[in-house]
Image: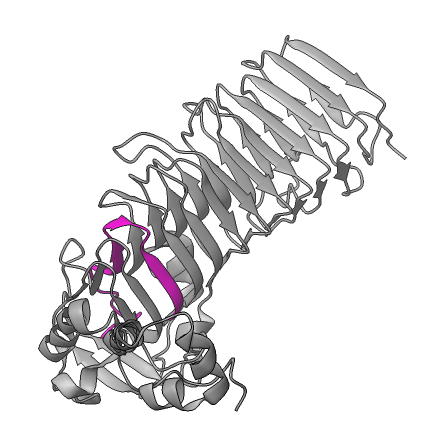
Amino acid sequence: MNSNTQKFSRRSFVGHSALAVGLAGAFSAGDVNAADATVAATSPVNARQFGAKGDGVADDTKALQAALDAAKTGGPICHVPAGLYRLNGSLTVPPGVTLCGASGGVPHSEQPLGTVFLAFGGRGMPEGEPLITLKPNAVVRNLTIHYPEQTLAQVTPYPWSIRIDGQLCQVLDITLTNPYQAIDAGTKWNELHLIRNVFACPLKTGIYIDQCTDIGRIENVHFNPNFWTRMGLKPGFAGGDIKGWQEKNLIGFKIGQTDWEYISNCFVIFPKIGFHFGDFGHGPGNAVVTQSGSDICPVAVRVDKTQPHAGAQFVNGQFMSTIEIGPENRGPVKFSNCGFWGTELTREQIRHEGGSSLVVTGCHFTGWDHGGKGDPCIRASGKRLIVNGCEFMDDGKKSIILEKGLKAATISGCLFRRPDAVEDLSGAEVKIGMNTSA
């Protein structure tokens, strides 16, 4: 075994001659014993040793909580071996402790071979205690969460699956088959959260961000019904119109007060609203959203409020529906190098009503005005508008209408498909030039 990858048990530590000689010059015997003690102290706590059965029948809540509490001094990793763990109650992961399942990466609900939590507690109580609460610097990773009693015939509210409560909490490599509310990073104060590699079919809210005072990160989060409808857990998906339910109820990413939120490689399909920015009681936030998108939905992005000095920026995004910027928004909203497609419900692809600036650069649009009623691709009555270097690909359709309420706009360097693609009804200061309509 290569010395760089050899497991550092006491025997291997002392027995490897070259390593032992090298360490002898740097450490006294007491130092080596201290190092051994440190390694031993960080060995995982095994939840099975605290009575967790993982048979899908016995309530493992108390046993898992006992293992988590033991990991405060005997961990800091609480390892939960492969199995089906019934939870009739809630778990709290103490500060600095990692709740770790058996999967080596992201578990897939089609092959639920690793650690699966079966959530029974909190049925009918959306404001109840979350299934898992992370205290400061706590981590949950490498497991699947499933709600066996949830159906589409009668969707039942449940508390949040995972709540972040404090700084530097991490949610990593998690699959949630059918949570009513998936991840809560807003009900409690938090900062520096990291939510990465999460796959789920949420029914009401995917991720809620609020009360975040410093730089949250959301990476590689994918919301798709397949994680419920195709799951391998018995008895399987009971059937129903999941698309119809989500398009009437699901908010994919609900973003309130947050300072410097970075969102990348995130996706949601069939939501009522894909990304919703607003003031949910603690003020608005700002965010940079890259390589992300919202697919087949009534509203891809809804901006009700953002921080006036920073706003929201979308780069390299894909959106199959409409962007709405509400009249109370004051922060700048920017779309750069994004693609827009329509659904059968799409009228405008951007409606700008806010008292803010909207900047659209290097984007392309197709599939607006599905009803054939003359709706433009962009309708702007908001304060300011810049459209630059964009392509409007639908032949014969009106591209931009400027309306009363607009204060100033520039439209330049764009490719249209009709000579009168821009209609100015605003009475504002508007500059239009260097466009083509070939």
Q: Nearer the viewer, residue 40 or 367?
A: 40
Q: Position of residue 381 (x, y in %)?
A: 55, 20
Q: Nearer the viewer, residue 191 or 381?
A: 191
Q: Position of residue 159 (x, y in %)?
A: 20, 59
Indicate left or right for 205 with 125 as reference: right
Q: Position of residue 329 (x, y in %)?
A: 44, 25
Q: Which residues are magenta?
A: 147-174
Residue 252 lies, with reference to residue 349, above or below; the image says below
Q: Quadrant of the C terminus?
A: top right
Q: Position of residue 37 (x, y in %)?
A: 24, 76
* The magenta stretch spans residue 158: yes
Q: Which residue appears at 11% of the width and 75% of the height? A: 66
Indicate left or right for 429 with 13 as reference: right
Residue 111 lies, with reference to residue 319, above or below; the image says below
* The magenta stretch spans residue 334: no
Q: Nearer the viewer, residue 404 or 314?
A: 314
Q: Which residue appears at 48% of the width and 30% of the height? A: 311
Q: Is residue 52 visible?
A: no
Q: Residue furthest right?
A: 438
Instruction: Give the image's coloring scheme.
Output: one colour
Quadrant of residue 86 within the rendered picture:
bottom left
Residue 303 lies, with reference to residue 13, above or below; the image says above
Q: Which residue appears at 54% of the width and 87% of the height? A: 2
Q: Is residue 145 visible?
A: yes
